[in-house]
Amino acid sequence: MKRRDFIKTSLVGAGLAAVPGVELFGSPKKTARADKVRLACIGIGNRGWDLVREFTKTGLCDIVALCDVDLDAGFCDNAKKAHPKAKLFRDFREMFDRIAGEFDAVSIAIPDHAHFPAVMLAMAMGKHVYVEKPMARTFYEVQLMMDAARRNPRLVTQVGNQGHSEANYFQFRAWQDAGIIGDVTRVVAHMNSPRRWHAYPQNPSRPPQAEQVPHGMDWNVWLGTAMWHDFSPKYHPGDWRSWWDFGMGALGDWGAHILDTVHEFLHLGLPSEVDPVKLEGRNDYFFPLSSTINFKFPARGAMPACDVMWYDGTDNLPPLPEGYGASELDPNIPPSGNNTVVASQLNPGKIIYSRERIFKGGSHGSTLEIISGDSSGLPEVPPSPSNHYANFLLAVRGEERTRSPFEIHGPLAQVFCLGVAAQRLGRKLTVDRSTGAISGDPIANALLAGAPPRGEWEEFYRL
């Protein structure tokens, strides 16, 4: 069945999957334990190549298809050379049309604004999904993706915040279970390395100047659901993260690597208030030069209310507690933006304040250390049974459960969406935690919903 025929059928027959005995085309293939997972990779340059390489290293999959809108660009060469037998595509929709029966799962490493249609189509057609953080660009898209996962419990989902399969994840869980981490009342998260937009002219009066689309590139598919923009090298490759219409700024980029365990194990959910207490260089096109955002989370059961303060910007370092010590960079953390680390700068990380202890931590899988309070009686931390990529593939084979599925990462991604809305509007937002709606602010709610998609992309919001 072709993709478009399937979409029409699934729209007409919505709800059939819940009826006992009814199997839709989108039901996943059962993968035997000894089978290699057949993987199609959407986005194969830069970060996409990292995923292709890491999935290949596991020995648990065969890369059967490679898809990239800029397939002729040099940054796609590594993946094509490494997997010469893989079928090549520029449009993921064409890939599903032509070879949907030849793969079991997809990896998606494309700009934030483009995650949603690729994920929704994959899940509708019964494919397991690994997608890079921050999952999606709008609150509404994240909600639809979580809803799709709930409707399809046999499908495996994983969001690409690798720290959820590294030491910090297992340490945080073990320390919390032992009562070492408890009664947390404040968390300070910081990412102060230079970002691409710091070099742009401030207060721009128009979008970037239109330039020629690279030969062979499918610019329409790159834009996807987003409103039309003329091509600019300031959008592709790489700089899309700088712009409101395509990315999620430093918060969406690094927040997933800094706050993931805090959010999950403290059961934070959605905040009740988001206050952008400092914004410098705010404009209509790209992210501020510096931001300080206070997320207020109410008490949850026996856990006290907790404030999470986010700091970004090269000149916007948070106050450090006594005994913080040196700011050391975990060698496993990739460099930010411009591929450099400034030695005198505070490296990405977090400070966790509980009633009895203060903890210092880095980003990704970096472990915590206690810098104030009793540090005796620490429990043994179990090793990770698999890295993030193997964890996904083993889950597809039915041997593990993913550690960052949509139901775990989705609410954190929605926290970022609320933070970006506060950055963009420059005002405090009061949030209904049960619905995610902003009280008394229709413009903020419109930002959470996102702009209407261009005509040919509307179908993905109805799946």
Image (cartoon, helix red, strand yellow):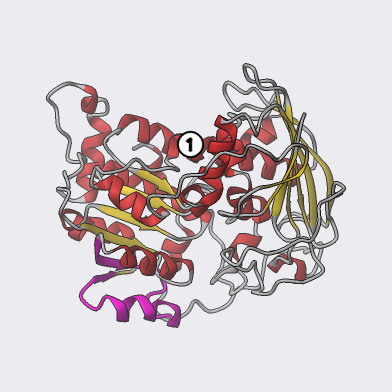
Quadrant in which residue 236 is drawn: bottom right
Q: Is residue 447 visible?
A: no
- Looking at the image, residue 94 sits to the left or right of residue 211; the answer is left
Rendered residue at 16%/43% (across/down): 30
Residues shaded magenta: 61-88
Quadrant in which residue 91 is drawn: bottom left
Q: Is residue 69 magenta?
A: yes
Q: Residues within 10 Å of mark 1 (few under 14, many from 20)?
A: some
**SS at badge 1:** helix
* Front-most of residues 367 and 6: 367
Residue lying furthest top: 301
Q: Residue 265 appears at what percent x and percent y? A: 56, 33
Residue 278, relative to residue 98: is it above or below?
above
* Front-most of residues 325 and 452: 325
Residue 408, relative to residue 246: is it above or below?
above
- Looking at the image, residue 28 sits to the left or right of residue 340; the answer is left
Quadrant in which residue 316 is drawn: bottom right
Q: Is residue 358 magenta?
A: no
Rendered residue at 69%/53% (across/down): 349
* Front-most of residues 265 and 355: 355
- Which residue was labeled with disc 1? 408
Image quarter (top left, top right, bottom left or bottom right) of the C terminus: top left
Q: Residue 139 appears at what percent x and percent y? A: 56, 38
Q: Residue 399 appears at what percent x and percent y? A: 26, 44
